[in-house]
Amino acid sequence: MTMTSNANSNRTVLTCTCEGTMAPDEGALARAGCGGAASATQLCRANLDHFRTALAKGLPVTVACTQEAPLFSEIAADEAPDVALSFANIRETAGWTAEARTSGPKMAAMIAAAAVTPAPFGVTTLESNGVALILGRDEAAIEAAASLADQLDITVLLQPGTKVSPPRQTRFPVLQGRIRTATGHLGEFTLAVDDYAVPSPSSRETLKFGPARDGATSRADLIVDLTGGQPLFAAHDLRPGYLRADPRDARAVADVIAKAGQMVGQFDKPVFIDFLADLCAHSRNGITGCTRCLSLCPTGAITPDGDFVQIDPAICAGCGQCAAACPTGAASYALPDVTTVTARLRAALKAWYAAGAKTAPAILLHDGDHGEPLINAAGRHGRGLPAHVIPLGLNEITQAGPEVMAAAFAYGAGAVAILGRARPKHDLDGLQASIALVASVAEAMGHGPVTLIETDDPDALEAALADLAVAPAPATPSGFLPPADKRGLLVMAFAEMNRAAPAPAAVLPLAQGAPFGSITVDTDACTLCQACTGVCPAGALLDNPETPMLRFTESACVQCGLCAATCPENAITLTPQLDFAAWDTPRRILHEEPPFCCTICGTAFATRSGIERIQSRLADHWMFRGEDGAQRLNVLTMCENCRVEEIVKQGFDPHDDKTRKVRTRADYLTDDKGERGN
């Protein structure tokens, strides 16, 4: 069977009844362009020739089975390595559910989404030479070191006051110390150690240590922490090369020992975040603007770096909250990238309606480690997902930003649900903020809800999804192609979400921190100095090289606040909002004045308000008082060239004998008669 992909190229789709345990809706698949031939009954065994025949065509192949993906991938690698291969699980998610008979549109949606090829991503290489530091408080650290001594270069660091037996033979150093600070990652850990001391070789009953000192430095490729105390790193289980276990838990200690023994060599780690520093709105000229990502990163991989931030790919664990929150698109997720996720949503919802669905589906965003097993368990042992719920896998649920949720509604989703853990691996503040933003906008426009389902129980998942009301299909769902830049996608997704809404809105107020908004300029205070245009990272504020003017593009404003913080007159106020009429206006004028022309040559060089403000502020200065003060103030109304000529003509020298000088100590020691005081 064949289908047409988003690139208008043919694709072969193979489905299977899995030995008669499910019945793919061939009619729905055919209407969506995902069918045309009878399903196999045992594609992975008796009908394996169907797969080989498909490979021989040389077209991309989508197999509606994930259980046997390793087998199909192995055959494809041997027989047709150039054929693009993708997989869709329609069995546990649709075919084995209680609503399997009406799940045809969902099957079509999942097959269509699987056909979207993700963009490539980069990797960073971490190298470990096996230099290991084992931290401990008792004999468990010594025993762990003995188990690893033949595999790793071991050093043991015991907490001060630890009582352990002296070793019969020194196979590895056993030292005393307390960790003050720790930085780094696999291959590059650096620790500052206080109370550092070496053991006495004459220790008899217990290991004794000599004089202690502070400020020692230790470097290691990996750390095995068996102290049972406070972890050395935030989100410690996400830090590569840092292994931790409670010394009282023998099984956990054994697991850590097994992992540590394998951490020698080079390890490729995905670069989860693509970062474009030029788009970063963190700071300009020493003034802080956007700090959204800094407050969200659970591992501390993001740090300020002058006007921008930097993201350490070796520490980044890939939660994606920075990319989801980034208003400019400087940080964007790469595994998969947001354009791929949005393209999959588009393909899925387009196929859903093409297959004949009359209602709007709910999109269920989930990860692979937690969500996929939970969904499979529901399909195998319970009622499974409802027919109107389309699951879409992500690397991490926290990578789902407002642009993804808004795009789902724009393409015709009736609701968006996100499946998380009962106990998240890290804070979900960024995700919660994205949900709150899109949920408030969706409610105002008449769209369905956005919900976070936090559970580890398949039954609880089924109950939560059953409560999602089935919404009517939108009259005209959007079909926009997602742009490559993240900011462009964010703006387009919300605009199209509004266009496809049951109750389109004109202006919607938003909460502080939203990535959209306007600015208000106090025209009485603004001098059109253009300081704001110089710091705007998004190009939302622009001058006009022909005349004194401040122009604004509302759809580009990211509400970073740099303009307001930079304005010397405090003339700018931020207003977070969605104003779709303003978005349709490319640029609007916030303030303009006629140019002020030089009173000598007539050259335009400033604004009248700017000149008047400078004159008023300098009027009380000693240089502009007295007989010549008015004449000197008048110099300020001249352009740079004429001003120089006038100063020379006046013969004004602020440093001559007649001009007041800066007061010195001697001036304060002189009495009223000009004589020195006693």
Image: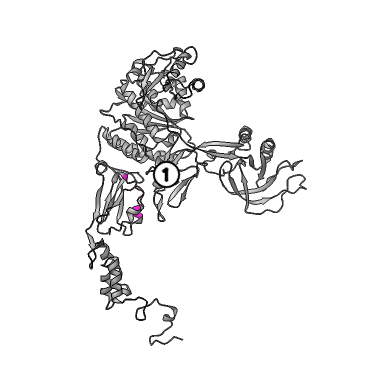
Residue occupied by mark 1:
276
Q: Quadrant of residue 336?
A: top left
Q: Nearer the viewer, residue 124 or 16?
A: 124
- The residue depicted at 68 percent of the width and 45 percent of the height is 162
Q: Is residue 559 magenta?
A: yes
- The residue depicted at 35 percent of the width and 44 percent of the height is 515
Q: Say whether residue 98 is visible.
A: yes
- State the SS at label 1: loop
Image vertical order of residue 624 relative to residue 211, above or below: below
The magenta segment: 556-565
Is residue 214 shown left or right of residue 23? right
Residue 505, given in percent of the width and then of the height, sits at 25, 38
By what rule are the colours in the image chosen? one colour
Image vertical order of residue 402 relative to residue 632, above or below: above
Which amino acid does the dot numbered 1 rest on? Leu
Is residue 247 shown left or right of residue 53? right
Is residue 256 shown left or right of residue 572? right
Residue 115, given in percent of the width and then of the height, sits at 40, 25
Quadrant placement of the N terminus: top left
- The residue depicted at 65 percent of the width and 46 percent of the height is 159
- The residue depicted at 76 percent of the width and 47 percent of the height is 201
Q: Residues within 10 Å of mark 1 (few under 14, many from 20)?
A: some
Q: Is residue 563 magenta?
A: yes
Q: Quadrant of residue 419?
A: top left
Q: Say whether residue 448 is visible.
A: no
Q: Nearer the viewer, residue 75 or 311?
A: 75
Residue 75, given in percent of the width and then of the height, sits at 51, 20
